[in-house]
Image: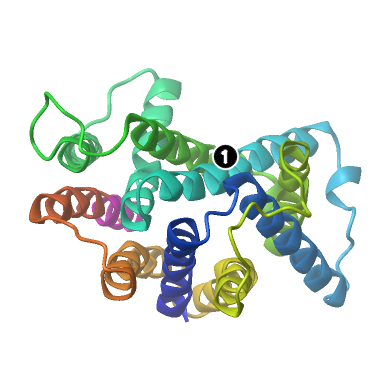
Amino acid sequence: MVMLSAAMWGLSGVCGQFLFENYHPDPVWLIAVRQVSAGLLFLLYTMIKREPLFAIWQSGRQNIAEMFWFTLGLLGAQFLYYYTISVSNAPTSTILQYQAPVFVILWQAFVRRQMPEGRELLGVVLAMTGVFLISTHGNPSRLVISPVALVSGELSAIALCIYMIAPATILQQFPTMLIMGWGQLISSLFLLPFCNIFDSGMSVWTPVAAGAISFIILGGTIIPFTLFLAGVKIIGPTKASLISCFEPLATIVFTVLFLGTVLLPIDYAGMACIMVTVVMLAVKKKT
């Protein structure tokens, strides 16, 4: 279940690249539709489970503040992830965002007022090496991806870091589905003023395009999230976090097979550096 959820998350990014390459939707519109639809589905699921829908908003200022920061992190992570896909490709966007644990380490080092040590420091160096190889192919005098893609990819990792750190207290008090539902729904409200929800900007609508958008909404949110949580209950969070590292691999395989995206050996080397970092830090967390 965990591997299937990771594969579905990866495939949703590939669907995004497919849409951007062939139908040219407005990225803001695509994310707004995804967020509002996913938010309503998560909240509907919460209602079916008979959970109190407004409990978070009645639980005090600290929880509301955490919810606010969580929502901003979620908005940044989701929007910048798909925006980076629109200006590069799905594997690059996924791998750049997977640096989030490194930014968590840097934040913790800042809070503790001390440098990362040992495996954490090695992880930071490996991640920086991976980004260097992906963005320059080993030549520091030129970028092989656009500066916009590099900046938005790095910002998406920082946003995901905020998304991971912010809800420490509320996750212990409220159902994850409830938090995700409100986070998705409220984050869409930030995007709606910047797009026309009734105008996708797509060059043409086809059943294939509609299917890709539907998969991004369902296969990229509520279905894999439900599968992931069910898997966590069976095998535990540590094993689940390691298995979920299958997502970038799935993204690479699907992109190369279905969209014909060409990645060079040095791209794979850079991606491997970042993936080794993620796995290494996850194993450290277990010990």
Q: Is residue 231 left or right of 54 when viewed as pictured?
A: left
Which stretch appears magenta? 278-286
Q: Looking at this view, is 109 or 132 the one in front?
A: 132
Q: Looking at this view, is 42 or 259 the one in front?
A: 259
Above or below, 197 against 156 in this view is: below
Residue 30 x %, y %? 63, 54
Residue beneath the point at 11% across and 23% down:
141
Q: Is residue 175 left or right of 273 when viewed as pictured?
A: right
Above or below, 89 against 207 in this view is: above
Residue 93 x %, y %? 38, 49
Q: Could you tell me the amino acid type at mark 1?
A: Gly
Residue beneath the point at 62% across and 43% down:
75
Q: Is residue 222 left or right of 263 when viewed as pictured?
A: right
- Asked which quadrant contains residue 155, the reply is top left
User: Is 285 colored magenta in this rendering?
Assistant: yes
Residue 64 x %, y %? 79, 37
Q: Looking at this view, is 164 or 157 the one in front?
A: 157
Residue topped by disc 1 = 76
Q: How is the image coloured?
A: rainbow
User: Is 2 colored magenta in this rendering?
Assistant: no
- Asked which quadrant contains residue 65, the reply is top right
Residue 267 x %, y %? 16, 51
Q: Characterize the local packing of mark 1: few (<14), some (14-19) or many (20 or more) Cα atoms within 10 angstroms.
A: many
- Asked which quadrant contains residue 275, the reply is bottom left
Residue 170 in view of the camera: yes
* SS at circle 1: helix
**Secondary structure mostly seen in the magenta stretch:** helix
Quadrant where the C terminus sits is: bottom left
Residue 175 in view of the camera: no
Above or below, 25 against 137 in this view is: below
Residue beneath the point at 43% across and 28% down:
107
Q: Is residue 202 left or right of 174 when viewed as pictured?
A: left
